[in-house]
Amino acid sequence: MKIVERHVIIFSIAMFVTAIGLFIYLPFIGTKRQFIVAIDIEELCRVDVDENDWEYVVLHHSATDEGNASNFDRYHREKRKWLHGLAYHFVIGNGKGSGNGEIEVGERWKKQLHGAHTADMDFNRISIGICLVGNFEEDNEPTHNQIESLQSLINYLSKRYNIPKSSIIKHNQVTQKGTACPGKKFSL
Ligand SMILES: [Zn+2]
Protein backbone atom coordinates (compact mmCIF):
# COMPACT_ATOMS: atom_id res chain seq x y z
CA MET A 1 0.00 0.00 0.00
CA LYS A 2 1.33 3.42 -0.91
CA ILE A 3 1.98 5.86 1.91
CA VAL A 4 -0.53 8.34 0.46
CA GLU A 5 -3.24 5.66 0.41
CA ARG A 6 -2.54 4.75 4.01
CA HIS A 7 -2.85 8.42 5.03
CA VAL A 8 -6.17 8.69 3.25
CA ILE A 9 -7.48 5.63 5.09
CA ILE A 10 -6.27 6.89 8.50
CA PHE A 11 -7.76 10.31 7.78
CA SER A 12 -11.09 8.74 6.80
CA ILE A 13 -11.20 6.68 9.96
CA ALA A 14 -10.41 9.76 12.06
CA MET A 15 -13.22 11.71 10.37
CA PHE A 16 -15.62 8.83 10.90
CA VAL A 17 -14.81 8.59 14.62
CA THR A 18 -15.17 12.37 15.01
CA ALA A 19 -18.54 12.30 13.25
CA ILE A 20 -19.81 9.52 15.51
CA GLY A 21 -18.56 11.39 18.56
CA LEU A 22 -20.36 14.57 17.51
CA PHE A 23 -23.51 12.63 16.75
CA ILE A 24 -23.53 11.25 20.29
CA TYR A 25 -22.56 14.53 21.99
CA LEU A 26 -24.64 17.05 20.01
CA PRO A 27 -28.02 16.32 21.63
CA PHE A 28 -26.52 17.27 24.99
CA ILE A 29 -25.15 20.64 23.92
CA GLY A 30 -27.40 23.36 25.19
CA THR A 31 -29.27 21.12 27.62
CA LYS A 32 -26.53 21.13 30.23
CA ARG A 33 -26.56 24.79 31.14
CA GLN A 34 -30.29 25.17 31.54
CA PHE A 35 -30.23 23.03 34.69
CA ILE A 36 -28.30 25.65 36.62
CA VAL A 37 -30.52 27.34 39.15
CA ALA A 38 -29.62 30.91 39.91
CA ILE A 39 -30.89 31.85 43.35
CA ASP A 40 -29.72 34.46 45.82
CA ILE A 41 -29.76 32.20 48.87
CA GLU A 42 -28.60 34.90 51.25
CA GLU A 43 -31.46 37.15 50.23
CA LEU A 44 -33.90 34.25 50.42
CA CYS A 45 -32.85 33.27 53.95
CA ARG A 46 -32.77 36.79 55.36
CA VAL A 47 -35.01 37.27 58.39
CA ASP A 48 -36.09 40.37 60.31
CA VAL A 49 -36.11 38.71 63.73
CA ASP A 50 -33.36 37.36 66.00
CA GLU A 51 -31.85 34.26 64.51
CA ASN A 52 -32.13 30.93 66.29
CA ASP A 53 -29.05 28.88 67.20
CA TRP A 54 -29.61 26.15 64.64
CA GLU A 55 -27.49 23.05 65.15
CA TYR A 56 -28.83 20.54 62.63
CA VAL A 57 -30.32 20.34 59.17
CA VAL A 58 -32.83 17.54 58.63
CA LEU A 59 -33.75 16.42 55.12
CA HIS A 60 -37.21 15.17 54.20
CA HIS A 61 -39.26 14.19 51.19
CA SER A 62 -42.92 15.14 50.92
CA ALA A 63 -43.91 11.54 50.09
CA THR A 64 -46.18 13.02 47.42
CA ASP A 65 -45.63 13.23 43.66
CA GLU A 66 -46.29 16.95 43.64
CA GLY A 67 -46.95 19.86 45.92
CA ASN A 68 -45.69 23.14 47.29
CA ALA A 69 -45.32 25.03 50.54
CA SER A 70 -48.89 26.30 50.59
CA ASN A 71 -50.39 22.81 49.95
CA PHE A 72 -48.35 21.33 52.78
CA ASP A 73 -49.10 24.33 55.00
CA ARG A 74 -52.83 23.80 54.55
CA TYR A 75 -52.50 20.10 55.25
CA HIS A 76 -50.46 20.66 58.43
CA ARG A 77 -52.81 23.40 59.64
CA GLU A 78 -56.12 21.69 58.86
CA LYS A 79 -55.40 17.98 59.19
CA ARG A 80 -52.61 17.98 61.75
CA LYS A 81 -54.01 21.02 63.59
CA TRP A 82 -50.60 22.61 63.89
CA LEU A 83 -51.00 26.25 64.78
CA HIS A 84 -47.92 27.33 62.85
CA GLY A 85 -48.79 25.27 59.79
CA LEU A 86 -46.05 24.13 57.44
CA ALA A 87 -43.80 21.86 59.47
CA TYR A 88 -40.67 22.60 57.44
CA HIS A 89 -38.58 25.71 57.13
CA PHE A 90 -37.95 25.24 53.44
CA VAL A 91 -39.62 23.36 50.59
CA ILE A 92 -37.78 22.61 47.34
CA GLY A 93 -40.08 22.03 44.35
CA ASN A 94 -39.81 19.37 41.67
CA GLY A 95 -41.66 21.24 38.92
CA LYS A 96 -45.06 19.82 39.84
CA GLY A 97 -46.84 22.34 42.03
CA SER A 98 -43.92 24.78 42.16
CA GLY A 99 -40.80 25.44 40.13
CA ASN A 100 -38.27 22.68 39.54
CA GLY A 101 -35.58 23.53 42.10
CA GLU A 102 -37.55 26.48 43.46
CA ILE A 103 -36.87 27.08 47.16
CA GLU A 104 -39.93 28.20 49.08
CA VAL A 105 -39.37 29.75 52.48
CA GLY A 106 -41.84 28.82 55.21
CA GLU A 107 -43.29 31.11 57.86
CA ARG A 108 -41.45 29.18 60.55
CA TRP A 109 -38.16 30.24 59.01
CA LYS A 110 -39.22 33.86 58.63
CA LYS A 111 -40.22 33.91 62.30
CA GLN A 112 -37.30 31.65 63.32
CA LEU A 113 -39.73 29.23 64.96
CA HIS A 114 -39.16 25.58 65.78
CA GLY A 115 -40.22 23.13 63.09
CA ALA A 116 -42.64 20.20 63.43
CA HIS A 117 -40.77 17.92 61.07
CA THR A 118 -39.63 15.19 63.47
CA ALA A 119 -41.43 13.50 66.36
CA ASP A 120 -38.84 14.87 68.80
CA MET A 121 -39.92 18.34 69.86
CA ASP A 122 -36.61 19.18 71.56
CA PHE A 123 -34.81 18.28 68.37
CA ASN A 124 -37.22 20.38 66.32
CA ARG A 125 -36.13 23.45 68.28
CA ILE A 126 -32.54 23.19 67.07
CA SER A 127 -32.97 21.70 63.60
CA ILE A 128 -33.79 23.26 60.27
CA GLY A 129 -36.28 21.19 58.29
CA ILE A 130 -35.92 21.05 54.51
CA CYS A 131 -38.46 19.13 52.44
CA LEU A 132 -37.97 18.08 48.83
CA VAL A 133 -41.19 17.54 46.92
CA GLY A 134 -41.45 13.95 45.66
CA ASN A 135 -41.83 10.43 46.90
CA PHE A 136 -38.30 9.06 46.92
CA GLU A 137 -39.36 5.85 48.58
CA GLU A 138 -41.61 5.01 45.62
CA ASP A 139 -41.69 6.43 42.11
CA ASN A 140 -39.63 9.60 42.12
CA GLU A 141 -36.02 10.58 42.37
CA PRO A 142 -34.93 14.09 43.32
CA THR A 143 -34.51 16.21 40.20
CA HIS A 144 -31.12 17.63 39.24
CA ASN A 145 -32.45 21.12 40.06
CA GLN A 146 -33.68 20.05 43.48
CA ILE A 147 -30.28 18.64 44.42
CA GLU A 148 -28.52 21.74 43.12
CA SER A 149 -30.80 24.04 45.13
CA LEU A 150 -30.49 21.83 48.18
CA GLN A 151 -26.72 21.92 47.99
CA SER A 152 -26.68 25.72 47.72
CA LEU A 153 -29.07 26.02 50.64
CA ILE A 154 -27.08 23.59 52.80
CA ASN A 155 -23.81 25.36 51.95
CA TYR A 156 -25.27 28.66 53.04
CA LEU A 157 -26.94 27.39 56.22
CA SER A 158 -23.98 25.33 57.37
CA LYS A 159 -21.63 28.31 56.99
CA ARG A 160 -23.97 30.79 58.64
CA TYR A 161 -24.80 28.62 61.65
CA ASN A 162 -21.56 26.63 61.86
CA ILE A 163 -23.32 23.35 61.24
CA PRO A 164 -20.82 20.55 60.55
CA LYS A 165 -21.42 18.00 57.81
CA SER A 166 -22.12 15.32 60.43
CA SER A 167 -25.13 17.35 61.60
CA ILE A 168 -26.76 17.42 58.19
CA ILE A 169 -28.90 14.33 58.43
CA LYS A 170 -31.83 12.53 56.89
CA HIS A 171 -35.09 12.28 58.80
CA ASN A 172 -34.62 8.52 59.20
CA GLN A 173 -31.36 9.18 61.07
CA VAL A 174 -33.21 11.00 63.84
CA THR A 175 -33.90 8.59 66.67
CA GLN A 176 -37.59 7.86 66.58
CA LYS A 177 -39.95 5.15 65.44
CA GLY A 178 -39.12 4.05 61.95
CA THR A 179 -39.65 6.43 59.08
CA ALA A 180 -38.44 5.84 55.55
CA CYS A 181 -38.17 9.60 54.99
CA PRO A 182 -36.55 10.89 52.77
CA GLY A 183 -36.81 7.56 50.93
CA LYS A 184 -34.32 5.06 49.55
CA LYS A 185 -33.87 6.93 46.28
CA PHE A 186 -32.62 10.04 48.03
CA SER A 187 -28.90 10.61 48.28
CA LEU A 188 -26.80 13.73 48.36
ZN1 LIG B 1 -39.47 13.45 57.03
Image: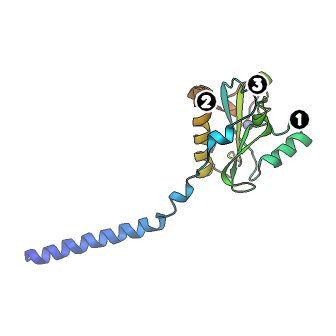
Mark 1 or mark 2, earlier in chain? 1
Provide the secondary structure element on which disc 2 rests: helix
Ligand 1 resides in the quarter of the picture at: top right
Which image quarter holds the C terminus? top right
Identify residue type, mark 2: Arg
Number of labelled discs? 3
Asked whether the residues under the numbered discs 2 and 3 touch, taking CB atoms below 8 Å apart as contact, a structural biologist would say no
The residue under label 3 is: 125
Identify residue type, mark 1: Trp
Quadrant of the rendered image containing residue 41: top right
Mark 1 or mark 3, earlier in chain? 1
Q: Residues within 10 Å of mark 2 (few under 14, many from 20)?
A: few
Quadrant of the rendered image containing residue 119: top right
Report the disc number at residue 160. Answer: 2
Viewer can see residue 79: no
Quick check: is the Cβ at mark 3 less than 8 Å away from ligand 1? no
Q: Residues within 10 Å of mark 3 (few under 14, many from 20)?
A: some
Viewer can see residue 28: yes
Mark 2 or mark 3, earlier in chain? 3
* Closer-to-camera residue (37/138): 37
The residue under label 1 is: 82
- Disc 1 and disc 3: Cα gap in Å? 15 Å
